Image (cartoon, rainbow, N blue to C red):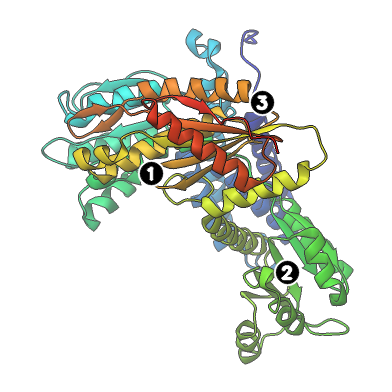
């Protein structure tokens, strides 16, 4: 009988279901026809499903899919090795059936009434629809327990706490299960419980805390299914951040690849392989267009043919490396060249990797994604503060200056706020720098969570922050920041013996009353000092600019 009350699938669930349908169809086509081309299509569909599970942060399912992908790539071969032998085909089909059955069970509507009211319990919704439940498995009187429960509750999580010896709750999968061992550490019984929860809740993240600095223990936890093994001294700055990151992950812009290739057939194959992995690409057939193309398209990576009219790929890459903006841009060579000496020389002269034509489309996509992710991470690290993930001082000021330049002549208003945590030195002195870092990160998380994507949030230095609110006058900006101020004052910060609370003060200045970035930050900073003089834990507006 059809369940009329089942909730509709979210966009992420629909995308996952589409990947699953594609995998099943490509496998059936290969089983029927047995050609190498159809096996290529199957491996591409499998790789696409792996990427989707990775984006959705479903670690248990991801491990199953990666295991099957490794098995499939081991059977890839070439046209002469297909169809694969019946034993290998039967083994691969069992893996396909197991994976499909597990994902379909996750996607299937539940008959449980509470799950029907809360479709997010599947763990596959948007970032605001993700399950907010957290399990805490710890001894009843563990000193970390109460502080973690209080702090997680402030950020909207529903914490279910139970002892290692208690029965596992018969509930929907949590977003995260946190494990804190007792005096015995992670012994056999503890490892068995971790393994059991991993098997029963493949969509959940499993974080093991208080892990000793032991390779043997860490390997045992990872084998049991743990996603993170966190040592004791990392707990105050790691646990809450990792949990909140699961909710605050943002969609990145599509990866962009510039394809420098004069063969239309090769271009078609490359673009087809990349597009199946959500990678955008732009081809040029003439290397003389390279500099204009990188300036206009702003690629994350260049796929460079080695031999083209007018100049070689190595020569084009050497030209690219003369420009400071593109000295770290990844360049991957594509060529039928098999001479190892030539390949090494090509890499020495500016390339990052060498792929021999014709290349496996799964390998091509994997190399491209890996290189781009590392390149973007390097770019991100150069502009973002390592502790909070916010823009650093220079990047925040640069964004503000760019924004003000774009607003010249417009009627748009904006406000700049300088924030500073009150009595921060005493927090470090009384509780230690790890707890002080936690306080800084908590304010950063509140700012990121409460402000808009169009606003600019940066760590200006130490315990000081800069916030730029677009399309906002002083009254509106003051109301928004005062709400964050009041909430931050009630936020508990966990430490080894309980929790503490902190406050911040802020100063506000507005554009166009002040026209430059330096004028705005200086006025906001003077207002911040006035807030400190008035007793802290308040927001003060900058004085009107004296008329000339």
What label sits on residue 227 in the rendered view? 1
Reading the chain from its start, which is encountered first: label 1 or label 2? Answer: 1
Callout 3 crowding tier (Cα within 10 Å): few <14, some 14–19, many ≥20: some
Residue 361 x %, y %:
69, 62
Inter-mark Cα distance, 1 to 3: 45 Å
Camera-side residue of 74 and 111? 111
Q: Residue at x 30, y 24 (%)?
A: 149
Camera-side residue of 59 and 418? 418
Question: In this rendering, is residue 186 above or below 413?
Answer: below
Residue 206 x %, y %:
36, 37
Reading the chain from its start, which is encountered first: label 1 or label 3? Answer: 1
Q: Quadrant of the C terminus?
A: top right
Camera-side residue of 125 and 104? 125
Inter-mark Cα distance, 1 to 2: 34 Å
Inter-mark Cα distance, 3 to 2: 47 Å
What label sits on residue 473 in the rendered view? 3
What label sits on residue 303 in the rendered view? 2
Q: Are marks 1 and 3 in contact (CB under 8 Å)?
A: no
Helix, strand or loop at mark 2: strand
Reading the chain from its start, which is encountered first: label 3 or label 2? Answer: 2
> Would you say residue 431 is visible in this rendering?
yes
Question: In this rendering, is residue 77 above or below 235?
Answer: below
């Amino acid at each position: 009988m059809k369940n009329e009350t089942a909730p509709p699938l979210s966009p992420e669930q629909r995308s996952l279901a589409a990947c699953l349908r594609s995998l099943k169809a490509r496998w059936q086509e290969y089983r029927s026809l047995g050609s190498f081309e159809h096996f290529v299509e199957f491996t591409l569909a499998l790789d696409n499903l792996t990427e989707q599970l990775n984006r959705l942060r479903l670690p248990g399912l991801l491990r199953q899919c990666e295991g099957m992908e490794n098995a499939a790539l081991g059977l890839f071969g070439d046209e002469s090795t297909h169809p694969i032998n019946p034993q290998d085909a039967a083994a691969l089909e069992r893996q396909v059936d197991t994976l499909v059955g597990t994902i379909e069970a996750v996607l299937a509507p539940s008959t449980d009434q509470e799950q029907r009211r809360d479709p997010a319990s599947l763990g596959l919704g948007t970032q605001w629809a993700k399950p907010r439940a957290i399990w805490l498995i710890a001894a009843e009187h563990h000193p970390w327990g109460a502080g973690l429960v209080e702090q997680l509750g402030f950020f909207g999580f529903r914490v279910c706490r139970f002892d290692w010896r208690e029965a596992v709750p018969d509930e929907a999968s949590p977003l995260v299960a946190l494990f804190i061992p007792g005096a015995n550490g992670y012994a056999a019984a503890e490892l068995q419980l971790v393994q059991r929860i991993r098997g029963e809740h493949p969509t959940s993240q499993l974080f093991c805390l208080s892990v000793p600095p032991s390779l043997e223990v860490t390997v045992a936890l990872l084998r049991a299914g743990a996603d993170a093994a966190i040592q004791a001294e990392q707990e105050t700055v790691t646990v809450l951040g990792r949990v909140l990151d699961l909710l605050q992950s943002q969609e990145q812009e599509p990866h962009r690849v510039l394809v420098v290739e004069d063969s239309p057939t090769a271009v078609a194959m490359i673009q087809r392989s990349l597009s199946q992995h959500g990678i955008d690409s732009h081809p040029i057939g003439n290397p003389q267009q390279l500099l204009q193309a990188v300036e206009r398209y702003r690629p994350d990576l260049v796929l460079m043919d080695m031999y083209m009219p007018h100049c070689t790929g190595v020569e084009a890459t050497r030209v690219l490396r003369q420009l400071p903006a593109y000295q770290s841009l990844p360049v991957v060579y594509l060529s039928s060249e098999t001479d190892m000496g030539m390949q090494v020389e090509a890499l020495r002269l500016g390339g990052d990797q060498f792929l021999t034509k014709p290349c496996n489309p799964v390998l091509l996509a994997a190399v491209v994604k890996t290189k781009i992710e590392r390149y973007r991470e390097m770019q991100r690290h150069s502009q973002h503060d390592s502790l909070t993930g916010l823009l650093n001082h220079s990047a925040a000021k640069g964004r503000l200056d760019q924004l003000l330049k774009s607003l010249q002549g417009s009627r748009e208003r904006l406000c700049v706020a300088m924030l500073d945590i009150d009595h921060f030195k005493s927090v470090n002195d009384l509780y230690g720098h790890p707890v002080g870092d936690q306080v800084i990160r908590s304010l950063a998380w509140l700012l990121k969570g409460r402000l808009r994507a169009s606003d600019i949030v940066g760590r200006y230095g130490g315990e000081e922050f800069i916030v730029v609110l677009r399309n906002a006058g002083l009254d509106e900006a003051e109301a928004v920041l005062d709400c964050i101020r009041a909430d931050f004052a009630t936020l508990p910060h966990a430490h080894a013996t309980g929790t503490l609370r902190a406050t911040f003060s802020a100063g506000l200045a507005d554009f166009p009353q002040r026209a430059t970035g330096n004028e705005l930050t200086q006025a906001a900073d003077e207002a911040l000092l006035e807030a400190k003089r008035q007793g802290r834990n308040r927001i003060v507006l900058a004085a009107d600019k004296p008329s000339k």
